[in-house]
Image (spheres, grey):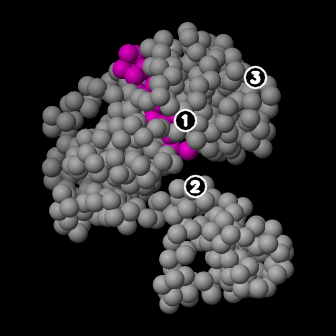
């Protein structure tokens, strides 16, 4: 949407909210949106007094109007018309389309850490940004949660815009695409929807797998895809699965295979350390190198949790005024225990835990799930039930089913008994910790 349309809506909505004409003329007549960047709208005001007054007295009202005019949730920053910042913003945006690409300024190629797990995906993304619609169209990037797919998509958009300042770039999630379609159908504005998505130079659509079971949305995206492809426009798609595994229409998945599919895997230890160092550098975090290694050795699930762990350690150290030189592995273990426990839950299942407990006590899994009530069988069974309850997301009935159809009250009794034992009996606590350690290392 061009500046004129956004500001037209902004002014119209403001006038509806400000019923007193004198108030409007005094404070809002010279107020406009001059820039939208990712999650912030820049609002021009005539002077410093107006800036202070509007920020204090009318921020929430203006924020509401801006969000309605732009159809997205934004923060506000007020800019004086006479300031250097205002001049810079106006000059920069004159040549740009205010439809806004929705690109996150933090996600650029320069800040993407390349490792063996993502080298090919990074190279393909850079090639597409520099030679759109010539090499790989569409570019289809897939991989697990938090591994960098979205970062690469935003980086493609930024780099392409740097090379083509007047180009129309749009990044959206498949959920946003779906919601836009639903709203356009509800309001009878399907042509506006089609103009938005089919008259762009680069479409970046994230998490395409969420189009599953949305037949109308799939159909609309099919025609959008064809229109852009026929017009020689670049399309970039991300998903958690390769095209062949998507549960959407075959006519779409076959088109996804027209270009290049590339995956992003789990980062290895060296890459995880490099990611932590890059994040620390960007955020001004100063820790010893061995701390990065400790965190990288414990957080292996995804980059999002890896970076979150670094921020957690830094925040804990800062808030508690801890000497950074005193940080050791036990401190890292305690600070990150919630995250590491979550990782264990993701990796473990009932069969693995039963096997570990059975091995520890020198019995078979078959004996453990039998109806035998002798203590040498029933106690390990209770330990196993407790650990499954603690280390997985299994419900009480599901745990009971795993043990030959035991009632959920039996499972609850076992879990309560072991929990109390851990608090009152050092031997039970030691046994549970030893079995947990064997599960973490896989040595049982």
Return the residue at label 2: 442
Q: Is residue 69 above or below residue 403?
A: above
Against 93, is 419 above or below?
Answer: below
In the image, which is nearer the foreground, mark 1 or mark 3?
Answer: 1
User: Which residue is rendered at x = 51% and y = 22% of the image?
Assistant: 120
Secondary-structure class at tag 3: helix
CB under 8 Å between discs 2 and 3: no
Helix, strand or loop at label 1? It is loop
**CA separation, marks 2 and 3?**
41 Å
> If you read the primary sequence from the N terminus, does the residue marked by circle 1 or circle 3 appear first?
3
Q: Nearer the viewer, mark 2 or mark 3?
A: 2
Q: Is residue 345 visible?
A: yes
Q: Residue at x 81, y 78 (%)?
A: 406
> Which residue bears the numbered disc 1?
265
At x 68%, y 24%, the residue is 256
Report x, y in % for residue 92: 28, 26
Residue situated in front as seen by the camera: 44 or 265: 265
Q: Element at badge 2?
A: loop
């Amino acid at each position: 949407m061009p500046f004129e349309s956004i500001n037209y809506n902004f002014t119209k909505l403001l006038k509806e909210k400000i019923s007193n004409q004198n108030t409007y003329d005094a404070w809002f007549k010279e107020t406009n949106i001059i820039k939208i960047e990712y999650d912030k709208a820049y609002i021009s005001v005539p002077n410093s007094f107006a800036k202070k007054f509007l920020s204090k007295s009318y921020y929430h009202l203006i924020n509401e109007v801006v969000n309605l005019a732009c159809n997205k949730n934004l923060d506000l920053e007020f800019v004086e018309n006479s300031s250097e910042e205002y001049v810079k913003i106006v000059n920069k945006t004159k040549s740009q389309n205010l439809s806004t690409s929705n690109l996150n300024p933090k996600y650029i190629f320069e800040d993407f850490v390349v490792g063996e797990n993502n080298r090919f995906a990074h190279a393909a993304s850079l090639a597409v940004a520099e030679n759109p619609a010539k090499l790989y169209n569409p570019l289809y990037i897939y991989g697990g949660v938090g591994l960098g797919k979205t970062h690469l998509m935003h980086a493609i958009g930024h780099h392409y815009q740097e090379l083509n300042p007047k180009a129309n770039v749009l990044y959206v999630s498949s959920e946003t695409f779906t919601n836009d379609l639903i709203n356009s159908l509800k309001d009878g504005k399907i042509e506006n929807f089609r103009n938005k998505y089919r008259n762009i130079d680069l479409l970046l659509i994230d998490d395409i797998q969420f189009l599953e079971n949305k037949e109308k949305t799939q159909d609309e995206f099919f025609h959008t895809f064809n229109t852009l492809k026929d017009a020689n426009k670049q399309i970039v798609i991300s998903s958690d699965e390769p095209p062949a595994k998507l549960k959407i229409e075959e006519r779409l998945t076959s088109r996804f295979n027209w270009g290049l599919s590339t995956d992003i895997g789990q980062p290895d230890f060296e890459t995880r350390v490099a990611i932590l160092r890059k994040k620390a550098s960007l955020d001004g975090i100063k820790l010893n190198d061995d701390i990065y290694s400790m965190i990288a050795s414990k957080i292996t699930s995804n980059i999002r949790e890896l970076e979150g762990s670094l921020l957690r350690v830094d925040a804990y150290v800062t808030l508690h005024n801890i000497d950074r030189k005193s940080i050791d592995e036990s401190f890292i273990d305690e600070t990150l225990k919630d995250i590491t426990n979550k990782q264990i839950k993701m990796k473990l299942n009932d069969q693995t835990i039963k096997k570990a407990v059975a091995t520890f006590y020198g019995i078979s899994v078959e004996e453990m799930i039998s109806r035998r009530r002798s203590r040498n069988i029933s106690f390990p069974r209770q330990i196993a039930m407790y650990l499954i309850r603690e280390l997985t997301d299994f419900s009480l009935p599901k745990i009971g089913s795993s043990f030959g159809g035991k009632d959920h009250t039996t499972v609850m009794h076992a879990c309560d008994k072991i929990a109390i034992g851990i608090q009152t009996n050092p031997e039970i606590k030691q046994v549970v910790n030893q079995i947990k350690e064997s599960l973490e290392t896989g040595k049982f």
